[in-house]
Image: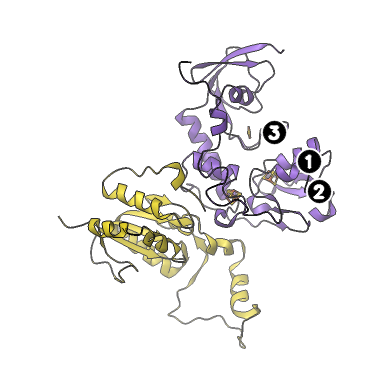
Chain colours: A yellow, B purple
Amino acid sequence: MAKPKIATTSLAGCFGCHMSLLDIDERILELVELVEFDKSPVDDIKNFTGRCAIGLVEGGCCNEHNVDVLREFRRHCDILISVGDCATMGGIPALRNTVPLRECLDEAFVNGPSVHNPDGKYPDDPEIPLILDKVYPAHEVVKIDYFLPGCPPTADTLWEALVALLNDKPVELPYQLVKYD
Amino acid sequence: MSQSVMFMIDGVQVEGRAGQSILEAAGEAGVYIPRLCYKEGLSPHGSCRVCTVMVNGRPMSACTSPISLGMIVENDSPRVAQLRRDLIEMLFVAGNHFCMFCEKSGDCELQALAYRFGITAPKYPYMFPKREVDASHPDIFIDRNRCILCGRCVRASKELDGKNVFQFVGRSAEKRIAVNGEALADTDAAVTDAAADACPVGAILKKGVGYVVPVGKREYDDKPIGSDIEAKRPAAGS
Ligand code: SF4
Ligand code: SF4
Ligand code: FES
């Protein structure tokens, strides 16, 4: 039987959750025995090659590209998991959510103390994804099946959840493994 | 000695004393009823409703309802747990709770309740309200992003400190905690006040002592909130 596939992505996140996944140390050898990585920064596969059993989403949505990738993950993955506080509640990027978007852009591209931008225009190259009015947690954009909060969730949290799901068991994490910090 | 009052919680007979609230009598018997706006030593406020129990089939706040003879209280049941979960989730989306850098994380009663109820994400959309921070005082600060409007600071200041530093202003979504002056620095608030230690969340904190306790050693890192009360429960059959 072919190994189930896993896909991972970092949207509006810092890659800290991916680092935490690598933090499972030598258990990574067990993990590659259990699964095959599909689209993921771990193996640098850019496009889905087929149906995935599990998708791990780090980060919420701060721009339209994040939304496209997240929807693509929902389409290709049987189980979609929000990994970390940014995917779960917006995280540090969502600190901008209480500030109007124009004020954020002005600070970043016009008025900021280290900005040099004589014509005062915001970057508008079509290659740059359009920024959203605010940062959205993943589950406010697509349906999410499981949440693993934490900044980042510990390697043990990720490991226990993955092993349970890959063995068709319910994800029942001990008290110490569900934390918001 | 006040008069003994027998009543039932979750099918178990409990003995309390006349005049006690359900929450207090249950606590003495080792039954933990979740709470946020209640704090021992302060008058009960009855505002957070996290202590909701069913009394003779009707929802009541356990911190403000006195016990009575033969009362039937439902505390540990799926429908009561669901009510409390929903309230806790609402508190998370109504404020700005960035636990990942909050000095109170690990010692926060709101966060600890969410852990106890196994909440991994709230079902309601986040509101991201705009809230003010007051860092004017040399030793204490207010971060209203984290305020859950429990009123513990208000009562501690009035009842224990004999001051009147904190008060609510506004109504409904505009309701917020205000201070008796332009800013906290203009009040007679002192770092030794009971009010400086009364906040269940990270909305009123002392300066210069954040993050002193390492992760893993904080109040709720290993044991759920309420464990100390539950430890008082006599072992089954004894
Ligand atoms: S006050 Fe409590 S729930 Fe709010 S951010 Fe701080 S630790 Fe988290
Ligand atoms: S500042 Fe703290 S103690 Fe005062 S009302 Fe807000 S949450 Fe309660
Ligand atoms: S603890 Fe009873 S209403 Fe808040």
Instruction: Using the numbered discs, state the Cα–Cα distance from disc 3 to disc 2 in whole angstroms.
Output: 22 Å
Question: What residue is rendered at 32% in x and 42% in y?
Answer: A170
The percent position of residue B159, horizontal first and vertical second, equals 79, 35
Give the residue pinned by disc 3: B45
Q: Please, which chain is the residue tagged with disc 3 on?
A: B
The percent position of residue B201, horizontal first and vertical second, equals 63, 46
Q: Nearer the viewer, residue B132 or A166?
A: A166
Q: Are marks 2 and 1 in contact (CB under 8 Å)?
A: yes
Displayed-image quarter of ligand 3: top right
Q: Earlier in the sequence, mark 3 or mark 1?
A: 3
Look at the numbered disc 1 and give the secondary structure of its residue.
Answer: helix
Q: Nearer the viewer, residue A29 or B49?
A: A29
Task: Note whether B223 is above or below A71 in the view shown.
Answer: above
Q: Nearer the viewer, residue A67 or B220?
A: B220
Give the residue pinned by disc 2: B189
Question: What is the crowding at mark 3: few (fewer than 14 residues within 10 Å), some, or many (at least 20)?
Answer: some
Amino acid of disc 2? Ala
**Name of the residue lying farthest toward the bottom:** A118
Instruction: Using the numbered discs, state the Cα–Cα distance from disc 2 to disc 1 in whole angstroms.
Output: 9 Å
Q: Are marks 3 and 1 on the same chain?
A: yes
Q: Earlier in the sequence, mark 3 or mark 2?
A: 3
Give the residue pinned by disc 1: B157
Q: Nearer the viewer, residue B7 or B82?
A: B7
Quadrant of the image containing the N terminus of chain A: bottom left
